[in-house]
Image: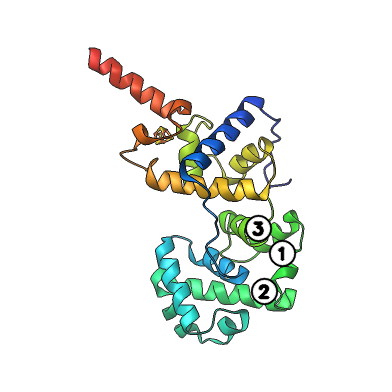
Amino acid sequence: MNTNSSSFQPKDVDLSRKLCEIFQKLHEFWGPQNWWPAETKFEMVVGAILTQNTSWSSVEKAISNLKKANILSIEGILQTPDQILAQLIRPTGYYNQKAKRLKDFCSFLKNEFNSDLQKLFSLEIPELREKLLSQKGIGYETADSIILYGAEKPIFVVDAYTKRLFFRLGLIQSETISYNDLQMLIMTNIKHDTYLFNEFHALIVKHCKQLCVKKNTKCNMCCLKHLCAYYVQNTFTDNKNGTE
Ligand code: SF4
């Protein structure tokens, strides 16, 4: 699949095995995450746009406001004055900008897909991704989240948590790896399966929020420590320092 990366990467059997093991361990440890938490596909898309640079709890408040105002629909959003829409989604921050993005996205759905989200979702992944990325304010992570959790098509969603975890596990050299290069690396070495990608991304987020946090990692409780370069290195350093 073309993910806009210029570098071709051959399959790496060792990495494939590690990715499978990481997924299995996380799945056994945390259980199924059953993302995306939304009642409809449209709500899912709205959530994906609103969740940029904010917490999920803020998105939940904004979605709840849109529901209470009875405007959580393409027409509802298009017909709501900008300032009122912005106030309803205020909990998510950048609310004026996000209100415009929501309206722009709804106009795009109306004009190009006759307000039918399923028509957009029926496109093949490369075309669907291109269409989504052509919308201002929709970047790789948002586009791929919509493809995976909205259109239910197999694409791996990368985020800062993925980069942190895979760097600590020793699977990548640096957290500065580009979005598309990391996505390509993973997708070259793992089965393309919507359920697998859905759960894997959700489990990485869960794991990094709960245990593999930025500072003060909770490595002793971690189900991945036997696979983790960061853990091995720090344990070795601690032991060495303890005997000196
Ligand atoms: S052992 Fe520590 S650093 Fe490694 S994945 Fe687990 S929590 Fe993260």
Residue carrying label 1: 121
Could you tell me which residue is drawn at 49 percent across and 71 percent down? 98
Q: Of residues 101 and 211, which is closer to you in this image?
A: 211
Amino acid on which disc 3 is placed: Ile
Q: Amino acid at mark 1?
A: Phe
- Queried on whether the Cβ of the residue with tag 3 lies below 8 angstroms from ligand 1, the answer reads no
User: Quarter of the picture for ligand 1?
Assistant: top left
Q: Position of residue 171 (x, y in %)?
A: 53, 31
Which residue position holds label 2?
108
Name the residue furthest top. Answer: 244
Please give the name of the residue rendered at 59% of the width and 79% of the height, measured from the top-left corner.
73
Residue 93 appears anywhere in the view:
no
Left or right position of 183 against 128: left
Q: Quadrant of the C terminus?
A: top left
Asked if 169 appears above or below 108 in the picture, the reply is above
Q: Please, is residue 90 above or below residue 226 in the view?
A: below
Q: Amino acid at mark 2?
A: Phe
Q: Which mark is residue 147?
A: 3
- On residue 65, the disc is none
Crowding at mark 2 (Cα within 10 Å: few <14, some 14-19, many 20+):
some
Secondary element at tag 2:
helix
Decide which of tag 1 and tag 3 comes sooner along the chain. 1
Residue 182 in which image quadrant = top right
Residue 149 horizontal/vertical position (percent):
61, 58
Q: Would you call the spot at circle 1 few (<14 residues within 10 Å), some (14-19), or many (20 or more)?
A: some
